[in-house]
């Protein structure tokens, strides 16, 4: 039984250029306790998708889905208020910029305390004890001092720990981490990643890790979704997907990562896609990768479906599967 | 904190120096000198003037035949009463209207409120006061035209705050005197509060709308907090900081307005007293009145700055 | 301010309905003040002793020759309002441009002063700004005496600090930018730097400040007239007319409502234009 199951999730925005689809036919499922990665360039719709799942998009966004179940309950059949309540009690989310994600005018303690009050309740004394416990759980040493401090007095890494503590206070079954380490120093990045995996185990949560960095996914996730122009173009087990990408875009993304200590194959260049990612307001006809894709053929003016190939889902007419194997 | 102190310190010092220099020049304008100075030079006399100011000797009005400071203090409570009530109106209604407009952004209520407040801050207060008198006093007969209280009430001036004094004389008139005083106060206070109210409402709206886009508001939403809590605790606290920092302008507008309001409603406060002094060329009173009112504004600005830095933790406790 | 910026600002401004409405009203008021006095039916000072306090046309006993009624001395309201419009706008424009000229000079000089002197000067400007404008004007009028010219000087002085602050602030901001550093390294002198590089970039801020100063100046000149410290009767000035009408609010409300309405509409339209200009020049502030 999946914790979160989504089929055909679409998110549209009204802009000056007309209706723009930021998330397109996304199919996604997350099992309890698993770590799932979502990878894509900036503007690929991965953050919008995360916000849509967490119910945080502005009312201007139009969200549709054929199927959207969370913890066994069908969200499409709920009133907006019920949906909001169900989502906030099951999903927590942390963001890229920890310092601006915390209210500058309130202390760390206050922001943690109001979360505990809303989700667990308890007397002020119990809540404070719980808050301090959460702060030390996320590896904040002098939790008593930090409790009284303001976000601007803490480093980015510490603030991200605070954000994780606040997320934990919601007792979520799914934690979405939207580029949680991108804005942090390199040395802090791995600490935060380790922390996320640690608290995931301790609290028996599922974790959705959104990033643009394959090296993060390789170590942490069991399953990966690759996004391009609002669509998931390839999904599969992390190891399989990284070692043999089926979708040309995944392959291009992987090739763009320089491998240290590994000799490049002859003739292999870094990032071999010509051109740039089109803005979602001006997408090409058919396959969105088509005009940039070295493998494209006549078929590619038709939008590709999601094909199931060897336990993977690929949105491509010409997946890079070796002929003799298939 | 230290830098903050230095900044406020220099501001205060320059302000007081400039202000006393201005009032000293003013005090020199009369036919007779304000004080019998020992020194004959301008600078020497200025320092003597300063010493006397600190000693509480602000000069003597030959027209009223009284020390000007006590004359000023006699009229001061009436002005304070009016200003405080107007300030209260402006803040309460200004904030409420601003929050209402922000919550219904783009809807008809928002557009209507913004239209009204735009008219509000373009309103010549001297015309607005007379329009209110024409409507509420002369046409509807709800409020008195002028003054602080009807003459039938013989109120002992104890604190010289009419609302308090009328309550003190409770044994004599019951609550009648108090309500009568309040009724006299309402129209001038509304007149005076209109412009700052409009400005506060517009600023609250735009500041709140700006803050509601912040990332920490998204975090607050993700925690499942109610919309009320998000607006009142998370957004308003941050939205108020810029409003506070430019509230000094509001008190300036109110102090300008109070002179006109007192003139329209024959309100026996320092504004009316000052205007009379100007028309009689009573420079001892003029310099005292301007000095005292300006000191009040400077003190208010300083208090506001300190409050703003208290509310903004980034200024209070730099990292 | 390059041409494309001006064009862009104009496009934003043109789409702003309230700003365009304000511009239209202001245009009409300005036109009336220009040609109105020629079309005014009577001399603004002429007293018709048989027509004292004649109500406007929309009253039952209104008269066609005095469409907006007469005041307590039998003077035609319409003529007085039209002449008042010319006087008020003329004075406002003079006051604002005088204040802007002096303020910009001081502000530009301040931007190149050494930091100690500049701090002192700007703190003094802060003081003048924080003091209630009417109080300051009254203090000045008290020294130089009441009357229209003196009230005008007082309002000029009151308006100067705004321009000093805007100019100094804008120049300091521009001077901190990289391109100015680059021209400096090329050996450009102060004057050249100011005229060719900084000046074009601070014009938007100044235009917005200028617009709002028009409404302040108009309001303050009329306020001094109202308090008896500015224009003296029988000058047809809107504030003075309001002051004269005080005694007749009940019997002849039109003597009070009409001049006030004239001030209000002028100030409102100026503020609408000012808001529109600010939004047009600063897209970040879009509502």
Image: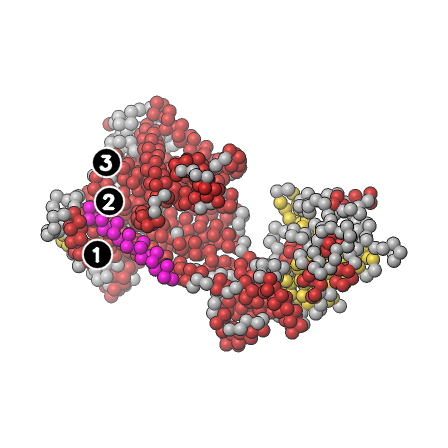
Instruction: Give the SS element for disc 3.
Output: loop
CB-based contact (under 8 Å), mark 2 and mark 1? no
Which is nearer the N-term, disc 3 or disc 2? 2
Foreground mark, 3 or 2, reads 2
Bin the neighbour count of mark 3 within 10 Å (Cα to Cα): few under 14, some 14-19, many 20 and up: some
- What residue would you read off at disc 2? C139
Is B18 within the magenta?
A: yes
- Residue C241, x across and y down, in percent: 29, 35
**Parent chain of label 3:** C
Does residue B186 appear in this view? Answer: no
Q: Secondary structure at mark 2?
A: helix
| Foreground disc of the pair 2, 1 | 2
**Residue corresponding to mark 3:** C147
* Residue located beneath label 1 in the image: B73
Q: Which structural element holds mark 1?
A: helix
Image coordinates for residue C257, horizontal then vertical, percent: 34, 38
User: Distance between the Cα atoms at labels 2 and 1?
Assistant: 20 Å
Chain under callout 2: C
Q: Which residues are magenta?
A: B1-25
Q: Chain of mark 1?
A: B
| Residue depicted at x 39% and y 36% | C191
């Amino acid at each position: 039984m999946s914790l979160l199951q989504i089929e055909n999730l679409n998110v549209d925005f009204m802009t000056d250029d007309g209706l723009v689809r930021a998330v397109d036919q996304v199919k996604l499922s997350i099992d309890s306790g698993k770590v799932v990665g979502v990878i894509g360039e900036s503007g690929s719709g991965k953050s919008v998708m995360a916000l849509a799942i967490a119910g945080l998009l502005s009312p201007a966004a139009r969200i549709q889905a054929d199927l959207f179940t969370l913890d066994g309950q069908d969200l499409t059949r709920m009133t907006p208020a019920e949906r909001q309540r169900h989502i906030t009690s099951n999903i927590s989310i942390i963001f890229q910029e920890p310092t601006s994600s915390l209210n500058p005018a309130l202390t760390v303690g206050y922001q943690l305390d109001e979360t505990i009050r809303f989700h667990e309740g308890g007397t002020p004394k119990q809540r404070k004890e719980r808050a301090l416990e959460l702060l030390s759980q996320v590896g904040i040493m002098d939790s008593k001092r930090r409790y009284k401090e303001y976000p601007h007095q803490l480093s980015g890494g510490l603030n991200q720990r605070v954000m994780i503590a606040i997320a934990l206070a919601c007792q979520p079954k799914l934690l979405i981490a939207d580029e949680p380490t991108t804005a942090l120093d390199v040395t802090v990045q791995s600490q935060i990643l380790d922390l996320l995996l640690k608290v995931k185990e301790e609290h028996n949560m599922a974790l959705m890790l959104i990033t643009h960095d394959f090296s993060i996914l390789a170590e942490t996730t069991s399953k990966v979704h690759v996004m391009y122009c609002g669509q998931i173009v390839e999904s599969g087990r992390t190891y399989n997907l990284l070692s043999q990408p089926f979708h040309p875009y995944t392959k291009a993304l992987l090739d763009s990562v320089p491998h240290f200590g590994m000799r490049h194959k002859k003739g292999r260049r870094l990032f071999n896609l010509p051109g740039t990612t089109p803005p979602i307001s001006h997408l090409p006809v058919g396959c969105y990768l088509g005009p940039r894709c070295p493998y494209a053929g006549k078929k590619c003016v038709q939008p590709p479906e999601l094909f199931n190939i060897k336990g993977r889902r690929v949105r491509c007419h010409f997946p890079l599967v070796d002929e003799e194997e298939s | 904190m230290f830098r903050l102190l230095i900044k406020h310190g220099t501001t205060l010092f320059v302000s007081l120096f400039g202000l006393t220099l201005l009032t000293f020049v003013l005090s020199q304008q009369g036919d007779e000198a304000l004080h019998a100075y020992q020194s004959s030079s301008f600078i020497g006399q200025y320092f003597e003037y300063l010493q006397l100011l600190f000693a509480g000797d602000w000069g003597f009005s030959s027209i009223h035949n009284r020390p000007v400071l006590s004359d000023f203090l006699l009229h001061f409570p009436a002005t304070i009463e009016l200003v405080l009530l107007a300030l209260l109106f402006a803040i309460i209604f200004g904030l409420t209207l601003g929050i209402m407009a922000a919550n219904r952004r783009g809807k008809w209520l928002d557009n209507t409120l913004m239209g009204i407040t735009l008219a509000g801050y373009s309103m010549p207060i001297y015309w607005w006061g007379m329009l209110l008198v024409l409507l509420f006093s002369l046409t509807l007969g709800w409020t008195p035209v002028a003054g602080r209280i009807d003459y039938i009430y013989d109120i002992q001036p104890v604190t010289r705050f009419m609302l308090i004094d009328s309550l003190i004389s409770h044994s004599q008139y019951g609550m009648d005197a108090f309500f009568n005083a309040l009724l006299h106060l309402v129209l001038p206070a509304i007149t005076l509060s209109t412009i700052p109210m409009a400005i506060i409402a517009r600023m609250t709206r735009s500041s709140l709308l700006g803050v509601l886009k912040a990332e920490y508001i998204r975090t607050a939403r993700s925690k499942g907090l109610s919309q009320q809590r998000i607006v009142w605790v998370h957004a308003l606290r941050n939205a108020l900081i810029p409003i506070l920092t430019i509230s000094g302008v509001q008190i300036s507008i109110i102090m300008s307005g109070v002179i006109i309001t007192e003139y329209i409603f024959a309100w026996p406060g320092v504004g009316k007293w000052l205007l009379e002094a100007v028309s009689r060329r009573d420079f001892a009173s003029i310099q005292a009145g301007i000095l005292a009112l300006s000191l009040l504004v400077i003190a208010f600005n300083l208090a506001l700055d300190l409050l703003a830095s208290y509310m903004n933790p980034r200024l209070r406790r730099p990292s | 301010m390059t041409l494309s910026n001006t064009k862009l600002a104009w496009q934003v401004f043109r789409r702003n309905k309230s700003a365009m409405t304000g511009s239209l009203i202001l245009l009409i008021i300005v036109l009336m003040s220009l040609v109105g006095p020629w079309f005014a039916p009577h001399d603004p000072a002429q007293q018709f002793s048989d027509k004292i306090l004649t109500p406007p046309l929309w009253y039952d006993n209104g008269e066609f020759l005095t469409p907006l009624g007469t005041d307590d001395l039998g003077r035609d309201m319409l003529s007085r309002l039209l002449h008042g419009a010319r006087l008020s706008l003329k004075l406002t424009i003079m006051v604002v441009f005088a204040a802007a000229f002096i303020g910009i000079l001081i502000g530009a000089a301040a931007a190149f002063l050494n930091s100690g002197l500049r701090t002192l000067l700007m703190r003094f400007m802060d003081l003048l700004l924080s003091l209630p404008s009417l109080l300051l004007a009254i203090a000045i009028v008290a020294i130089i005496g009441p009357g229209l010219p003196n009230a005008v000087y007082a309002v000029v002085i009151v308006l100067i600090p705004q321009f000093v602050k805007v100019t100094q602030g804008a120049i300091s901001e521009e001077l901190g930018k990289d391109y100015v550093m680059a021209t400096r390294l090329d050996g450009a002198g102060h004057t050249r730097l100011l005229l060719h590089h900084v000046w074009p970039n601070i014009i938007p801020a100044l235009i917005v400040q200028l617009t709002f100063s028009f409404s302040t100046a108009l309001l303050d000149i009329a306020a001094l007239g109202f308090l008896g410290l500015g224009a003296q009767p029988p000058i047809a000035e809107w504030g003075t007319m309001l002051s004269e009408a005080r005694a007749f609010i009940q019997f002849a409300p039109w003597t009070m409502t009409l001049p006030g309405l004239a001030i209000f509409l002028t100030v409102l339209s100026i503020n609408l234009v000012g808001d529109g200009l600010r939004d047009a020049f600063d897209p970040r502030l879009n509502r």
